[in-house]
Image: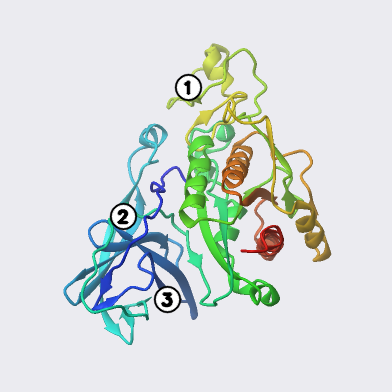
Amino acid sequence: MRTSRTIVAPIVALTAAMVAGVAFADPQQLSGRWTEWATLRRNTVRFRLAPIEGGAWQCETRSPRDFPRRLTLTRSGDAWRLRLEQRVRVGSLVDELLDREGGWAWGPHSVVELEERDGRLVGGNFVIDLPREAAAPGPAPATPVGPLASQPGALGETSSSELPVVRVLLTGFDRFPRPANHPRWLNTPEDRREPSINPSGWAVRNFDPALLDPALRGRVRIEVHRLTDVPVEYVEGARAITDRIKQVDADVAISFGVGSDGNVDADVETTCTNLMHDGSGLSGEGEGPFHLPAHWPPSTPQSRWSDEDRAWLWRYPDNAGVSYNRKKIDPTKPDRLRSTLPVREIVRRSEREGLTAHDGGGGPGQYICNNVMFKVIDTQAERGRIGGFIHMAQWDERKQDRYLKVLRLAVEESVKAYLEARPSN
């Protein structure tokens, strides 16, 4: 849920493209992997490069050491180069609060020279697969495309099987809270104001699709796409997810978050409301948005604070410092929407496999999770697909295996439900 995110945009199909004299069978993306050794352990991140304007390919991902990086592949004649850029934080706290890009920029970079070997581009710690199928000789024109629409950690793993395909999008949030003057930090020393790890973002990033049920993978090819570090922001968080849903043409969209109840492994939400609300309970102040002042909290005694400054003692703004008070997400939509995921099956399966789970009868609240759930369900309903939201337990390193199990079971049961609902897929 990071405030700095690239703009998510659809990828326009290419009619054809040429690499080293071979026409791409699937020019929309190139698969690659990045491998490094750390403390006698090999770490590998898989990525997919998509075309951008100028005849290059690009993606944003995380290196094996978990740093956000942007990879840009270019070609000049027979020479291939891969540019690696690292995301760095810039600007002051005020810049972060006022700038929707959150004070992040692409900074230091390096260039890796690649050479073609046996249908692959190889260089440094990188291997990029070139398409195997060849077309008629000669270059083919490419349809221009927009900028790459991906996020750090937004990887898609696919199978080469000829089975029917189900595309699954998994999303998880960024750390929270980001603003150093967030009301949550009021009584916390400045040197201890570290945003909490969100288990949803961690789990989506570390989930291994190879662990999905082999019997299910024998029936269907499951493409797993990820969106991690979703902004903890009312509008931008939901927008990033819905744009990504359309970009990857997701059949199943499952968004994950962290619940206020830290004891339940899988709180599979059933319904959500058409409201953005920080839970402050204030009345008569309007719907918002309200923007956390850069100077908050005032240096004067609370008895001398203005009513507006005092209101932030009860408000709970997002990572952009924005708060709402019972504002409709979309006035044209119903007051409530119901998850189209197989809630009961996910809960029962989770319990059978030793997890604590329930169907989220109380709803996801009216904060960012509710906003995301509402937009995911609505977007998928318009597309004739399924989607919903699952809360995880609070972050605990000892629960990492349980977080990953929640993802696995949710994907398996949701894919089964989608297949049953759309047998012709």
Residue most extreme to the left = 77
Q: Which residue is mark 1?
A: 299
- Front-most of residues 352 and 53: 53
Report the disc number at residue 145: 2
At 64% from the left edge and 64% from the top edge, which residue is drawn? Answer: 424
Q: Earlier in the sequence, mark 3 or mark 2?
A: 3
Which amino acid, mark 3? Thr
Which amino acid, mark 1? Ser
Residue 323: x %, y % from top left: 54, 28
> What SS does tag 1 mark?
loop
- Front-most of residues 361 and 337: 337
Please identify the quarter of the rendering in which residue 399 is found: bottom right
Front label number (3 vs 2): 2
At 44% from the left edge and 42% from the top edge, which residue is drawn? Answer: 3
Label 2, label 1: how many angstroms apart (C-alpha)?
A: 51 Å
> What SS does tag 3 mark?
strand
Is 108 on the left-hand or right-hand side of 222? left
- Residues at marks 3 and 2 touching, judged by CB atoms closer than 8 Å: no
Label 3, label 2: how many angstroms apart (C-alpha)?
A: 29 Å
Is 40 on the left-hand or right-hand side of 138? right
Front label number (3 vs 1): 3
- Front-most of residues 215 and 152: 215
**Quadrant that contains the C terminus:** bottom right
